[in-house]
Image: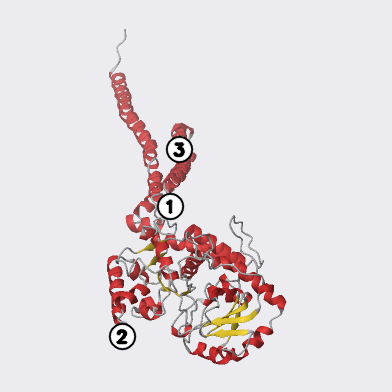
Amino acid sequence: MRLPNKKQLQYSQSTFWSSSSFLVLLLLILPLAVISVLVFTLAPASTTSFSPVLSRKVGVSGYSDSSVSESTGTTDHIFIANETIQLGYQREQIRDSSSSDSLAANGTILLVQEQEDISKQNESEEVTVTSSMPEPVKRYSKLEKLEASLARARSSIREAALVRNLTSVHQDPDYVPRGPIYRNANAFHRSYLEMEKLFKIYVYEEGEPPMFHNGPCKNIYSTEGRFIHEMEKKNNVYRTKDPEKALVYFLPFSVVMMVEYLYVPGAHEINAIGRSLVDYINIISNKYPFWNRSLGADHFMLSCHDWGPRTSSFVPHLFNKSIRVLCNANTSEGFNPSKDASLPEINLLTGEVTGLIGGPSPSHRSVLAFFAGRLHGHIRRLLLEQWKNKDEEVQVYDQLPKNVSYNKMLRNSKYCLCPSGYEVASPRVVEAIYAECVPVLISDSYVAPFSDVLNWKSFSVQIEVKDIPNIKKILMGISQRQYLRMQRRIKQVQRHFVVNPTPNRFDVFHMTLHSIWLRRLNIYLH
């Protein structure tokens, strides 16, 4: 064998070392290159996998973009935007690379697809999260809920008022208002039905009988006592024991009983009565929040005594803001028809209406007009001076003969004269309606009961005080046909003035409630 010479040996050694160096280099560089590619391709995936999800979770947390920026700064938004830009730049570079980088390119394209899938998934997650988190619900106070129910009732009544039919279109098993005795039969009926559905009254329990929670159920002041006793009954469907549910608050004092127990006969002042009422309102306003909340606007008192208005004047807010239900409905003495209600004065000698309602037909009524009553105020003085013992057809007495029945005279007359006394109210109005005698109202500044619902001109005659000398002429000028119409309407309107032992729908108790209900509709409490 021929041995290599020195040059050959040197050449082979250099070749060996070169190849060895190459191998070593390859072994060192190749893993680093692979690791670099893996890091290069995997690093964006980890970033893109959480950045958009983080931004959407913040976005669905209930805040707007501006609120997020204020609370977390704009760094997150810039960071997410930059990542998106970087991802696009890398994607373009990968698309331009050689085929030897196809694995990396495919990997990056896969990440881009994952980014799109994640975006779609996050959008669906955003919708899901948003729908699972309800909008904040406004919590309304009990008063706001009550006012909302009243607003709906007002709207319903206004809509019903657009119907100009003489007959209500609402169904009712007991009674359907109809005819010209009503200002608007349909609106009244709708209002009455809304009252039955919504109206609740809280009766203050403070105060002791006999001046509170009590009243006369007989004689000329019977309306006051009957109403108080009906409101005190436990089975009264309009009464609530929860003051938060009430629309109005009843002050159950009786002016009649205060006069009986606190007034000194012959005295010229009623300060003791006034002080008692002031003390009572102070107790109510200190114990409950309701009086101060409305300054008494959703509170009501009821009185049939002549001194009812004067008594209420001791508490200015009671006089000026509260609902005052008064027999003495005199506008010249502060009665405000938009907030105060007129109460019919009914003289129940026995406490019952038995034998008082009804009368003969018009053809059996021989007297044109009738009045009997003592001298009581300037209007009666004028009436007696002008007509007492002057005319057989207009029979006016200050005192009936012993053999003449007052009730029989009412039933034997076509028209019954109802002049005011010292105060504007007169029990003769309801007496005439009971006897089916057309009432003739002679007064100044008097607001007739339930006149916001009833059209008094359709079933009564109203004569000014200055026309007292012309009473016969005025009444004779009414045709027989018109008189018969009014007499039929009197029979129809009777039901609204009847006092029942147990109140029936549309009777005087419920009509009084309806008057209070209408006044409550006139106010809005904030």
Q: Residue at x 54, y 76 (%)?
A: 406
Q: Alpha carbon of mark 3 to alpha carbon of mark 1: how far?
A: 32 Å
Name the amino acid, label 1. Answer: Glu
Q: Are marks 3 and 1 in contact (CB under 8 Å)?
A: no
Residue 190, percent from left and from top: 57, 62
Q: Residue furthest top?
A: 1
Task: Give whichever of discs 3 and 2 has the lower sequence position.
Answer: 3
Name the amino acid, label 3. Answer: Glu
**In this rendering, is residue 454 above or below 78?**
below
Q: Alpha carbon of mark 1 to alpha carbon of mark 2: how far?
A: 68 Å
Q: Residue at x 37, y 55 (%)?
A: 68
Q: Secondary structure at mark 2?
A: loop
Read off the residue under disc 2: 267
Name the front one of labels 1 and 2: 2
Q: Quadrant of residue 8?
A: top left
Name the front one of labels 3 and 2: 2
Residue 415, percent from left and from top: 62, 79
Nearer-the-camera pick, 55 or 84: 55
Read off the residue under disc 3: 114
Q: Alpha carbon of mark 3 to alpha carbon of mark 2: how far?
A: 100 Å
* Quarter occupied by the C terminus: bottom left
Nearer-the-camera pick, 486 or 238: 486
Relative placement, left or right, of 484 versus 329 is right
Task: Give whichever of discs 1 and 2 has the lower sequence position.
Answer: 1
